[in-house]
Amino acid sequence: MNTDVAVVIDIPGRGQGLKAARNVTAGEVILSDLPIFIAQNDVGEFCTACLRALAGRNDTVACHDCGQATFCSGACERLAQEDPAGHSPAVCRTLSKLDLHGLSGESVAALRFLVQAQALFMASAHNEAARGRWAAFAGLSGAADSKSKDSSDLFRRLSTATFSAQLPQLAGSRPFLPEEVADALAKEELNGYGIMAQSGPQGERRIRGTAIYPTASLINHECLPNVARTDDFDAADVKAPHNTAVHFKALHDLPAGEEFTQSYFPMHTSYPVRQQRCQEQYGFTCTCPRCKEESTWPSDDEADSLGEGDMEVEAGGEPGSSMEAAEGEGERADAGYIQVFLLKYVCPQADCFGTMVPSQPGSSVHVCNMCGCQRSEAQFLADLKAAHSAEAMA
């Protein structure tokens, strides 16, 4: 972490967070973070080591020992084999013994994640580098109660595969206990970043895998965030494993001392769904200014303007009003401001709902962190005027 930009703070009732150590310019990178480890969702479409898309590559390598790993190159295969939490011999042998019968895709991904987490835990008993990474993972927030109801079957399958794999255990090394399985799943639930893939044939959002980041996990949620993440997973000019880093950019200018916040889900998500997900997945009630404002809206307005489908923006205020005039007013989130914020920062492409992020500090061009579409400040103001005109005619 660049302590010139971001510092860790303790927030009463909310744990830790990150705040600006100085004034931050829109588009500035406030954090770049490499993962503790990554776990892929599906085998064969993305590289097990670095999650690059494999389509169109002619140098892919498959693991014939377990049939549960594919790599974009021999270099990535070697990288994964040397990583205790990657595709090390312990991970490979355990994966080859897993009983996946009757499991949903989500449970298969969770079980693969547990195999890698357990391998890192076991290696931490005798490997200093693994010890540091495991300590970073163990230090993440997570309440085992949130996953305990789901963990018993996964523990049974993991322990059976571990025993069948006959992993050599050095002094101090042992496999997970049941409560450690529940704890690892809870940490993944609360701290894991879903790494997005290109949308499917019907426009559905897809996740290529999960990554656990040591510092990015400290960035708290807000429904009108001030930072958004970007990544380089498929960048041809970024060498693995550096392509697995995430970068957080400021959406607008921020003063020193301001807490950095991100949205844990797409910003177009409706108020009731946001509240439900915050409660069920993360265990808190969101009381941010946007939620306070939207809690007063009639339910029909919520569905019309912020539903899970296409978003109909109702721009408030005067046409051409400046976002910068309202940004930074932490407690202000009236209906007009919310709608203008969403119009500016939610991707205008149909069915994308990514976040429009300044391309670089001082730039008037914003780029979607999902689909890559670009929009200038002039184009945004034209869209804002058109939305206002449509509202006036309605």
Image (cartoon, rainbow, N blue to C red):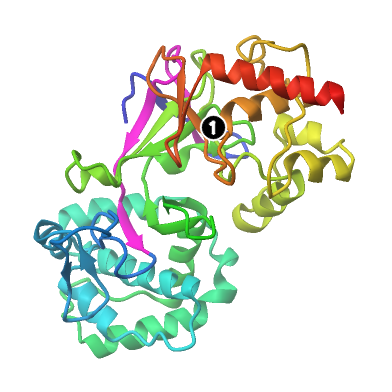
Which is more toward the observer, 4 or 42? 42
Which is more toward the observer, 20 or 357? 357
Q: From the viewer's perspective, tell me whether residue 112 is left or right of residue 79.
A: right
- Locate residue 336, reporting x and y percent: 77, 22
Neighbor class of circle 1 (other Cα within 10 Å; few <14, some 14-19, many 20+) is many
Residue at image position (47%, 74%) is: 105
Decide if residue 272 is in sight here.
Answer: yes
Residue at image position (36%, 30%) is: 31
Circle 1 residue:
261
Q: From the viewer's perspective, tell me whether residue 96 is left or right of residue 353.
A: left
Please say if 95 is above or below 203: below
Q: Is 27 inside the magenta-drawn segment?
A: yes
Please say if 366 is above or below 53: above
- Locate residue 378, reporting x and y percent: 55, 14
Rendering quarter of residue 300: top right
Residue at image position (49%, 83%) is: 153
Q: From the viewer's perspective, tell me whether residue 296 is left or right of residue 11.
A: right
- Please state the extent of the stretch shown in magenta in the rendering: 16-40
Q: Secondary structure at mark 1?
A: strand
Q: Is 272 inside the magenta-drawn segment?
A: no
Rendering quarter of residue 11: top right
- Locate residue 103, reporting x and y percent: 48, 82
